[in-house]
């Protein structure tokens, strides 16, 4: 099981002019597992994980910074032509108190199981804690299938007050060439900073992300900045080489009610990446999600 980093949420921290000083009792996480499947996980339409080869895993990840007040949605996608009867996916929403170890002390708000290879199977809520702050919206939990992938769609209510995150505040974006071309220009600006090895400017460009992750984790902003430092790539040019941005048109992706945007080149690959020149075919992708606010692109996650 992938180690779940302990995050201690303290919502009394200040975010400048933002009204985000609300006390929160619990931290939130998601646990999901698949057996022998390709899969990807999304929350509010924002991709958290992608595994493009058949895999067996049981993973956990903190998601407090993706949980809003009221209705929320998680999607677990899989894709293949046929499923075996034993193919199963599980998604659990977790909560724990500050200071608890989420690997051993987290409580399960609810768990959904889907047997993908069983005829007429549907997602089932196999456990639910009525006292938990996260409650499943049972009538809206469903399985959706199309030509490209299948989705277990899970919606739930959050009864605990949360801050208003940047991904809720961006402008509503249009899925068109103008939006894509504008975002391409922002990618090119960031690519130039990567090419110059300007770690400080890159971290400054992500100030909103740093502030919100510090708020969500209860850790100092300097720690979060250090965690996102790109110096590992800049200090090891014999290992990492910045790839060129593609010249052909990239694909615009929108999420969170069309307030979050990012570009992909092919598949789900984001275009900012460092190639590992010591291992053919290995690359480190720089995943960045944007909002547009007051006419300016802003790194949100």
Image (cartoon, helix red, strand yellow):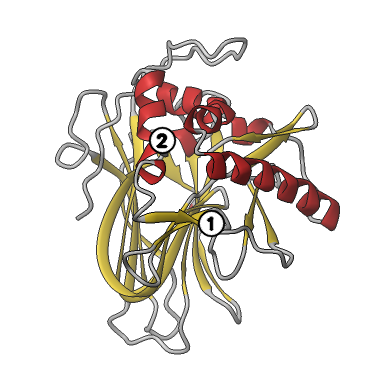
Q: Residue 245 appears in which quarter of the rendering? A: bottom right
Between disc 2 and disc 1, the foreground one is 2
Instruction: Tell me the quadrant of the picture where the N terminus can be found.
Output: bottom left
Secondary structure of the residue carrying numbered label 2: loop
- The front one of 7 and 263 is 263
Whether residue 161 can be seen here: no
- The front one of 44 and 180 is 180
- Which x, y percent locates residue 265? 61, 65
Q: How far is mark 2 from mark 1, CA to CA?
A: 39 Å
Image mark for residue 37:
none
Q: Residue at x 73, y 47 (%)?
A: 183
Q: Residues within 10 Å of mark 1 (few under 14, many from 20)?
A: few
Q: Residue at x 67, y 38 (%)?
A: 291
Whether residue 254 is situated above or below residue 72 in the rendered picture: below
Secondary structure of the residue carrying numbered label 1: helix
Q: Residue at x 60, y 14 (%)?
A: 18
Q: Which residue is mark 2?
A: 228
73 vs 263, left or right, is left
Q: Which residue is mark 1?
A: 139
- Which x, y percent locates residue 88? 32, 73
- Which x, y percent locates residue 229? 40, 34
Whether residue 94 can be seen here: yes
């Amino acid at each position: 099981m992938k180690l779940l980093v302990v995050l201690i949420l303290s919502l009394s921290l200040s975010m400048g002019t933002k009204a985000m000083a609300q006390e929160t009792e619990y931290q939130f996480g998601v646990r999901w597992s698949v057996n022998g499947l390709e899969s990807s996980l999304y929350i509010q339409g924002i991709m958290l994980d992608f595994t493009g080869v058949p895999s067996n895993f049981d993973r956990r990840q903190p998601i407090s910074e993706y949980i809003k007040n009221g209705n929320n949605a998680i999607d677990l996608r899989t894709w293949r032509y046929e499923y075996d009867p034993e193919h199963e996916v599980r998604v659990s929403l977790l909560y724990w108190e500050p200071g608890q170890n989420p690997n051993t002390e987290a409580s399960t708000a609810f768990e959904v199981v889907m047997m993908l290879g069983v005829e007429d199977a549907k997602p089932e809520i196999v456990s639910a804690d009525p006292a938990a702050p996260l409650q499943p919206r049972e009538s809206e939990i469903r399985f959706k299938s199309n030509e490209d992938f299948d989705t277990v769609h899970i919606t739930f209510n959050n009864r605990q007050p949360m801050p208003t995150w940047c991904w809720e505040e961006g402008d509503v974006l249009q899925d068109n060439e103008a939006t894509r071309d504008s975002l391409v220009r922002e990618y090119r600006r960031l690519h130039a900073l990567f090419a110059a090895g300007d770690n400080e400017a890159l971290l400054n460009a992500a100030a909103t992300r740093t502030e919100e992750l510090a708020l969500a984790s209860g850790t100092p902003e300097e720690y979060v900045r250090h965690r996102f430092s790109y110096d590992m790539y800049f200090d090891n040019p014999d290992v990492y080489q910045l790839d060129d941005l593609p010249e052909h048109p990239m694909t615009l992706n929108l999420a969170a009610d069309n307030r979050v945007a990012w570009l992909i080149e092919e598949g789900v690959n984001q275009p900012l990446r460092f190639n590992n020149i010591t291992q053919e075919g290995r690359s480190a992708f720089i995943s960045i999600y944007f909002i547009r606010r007051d006419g300016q692109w802003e790194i949100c996650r």
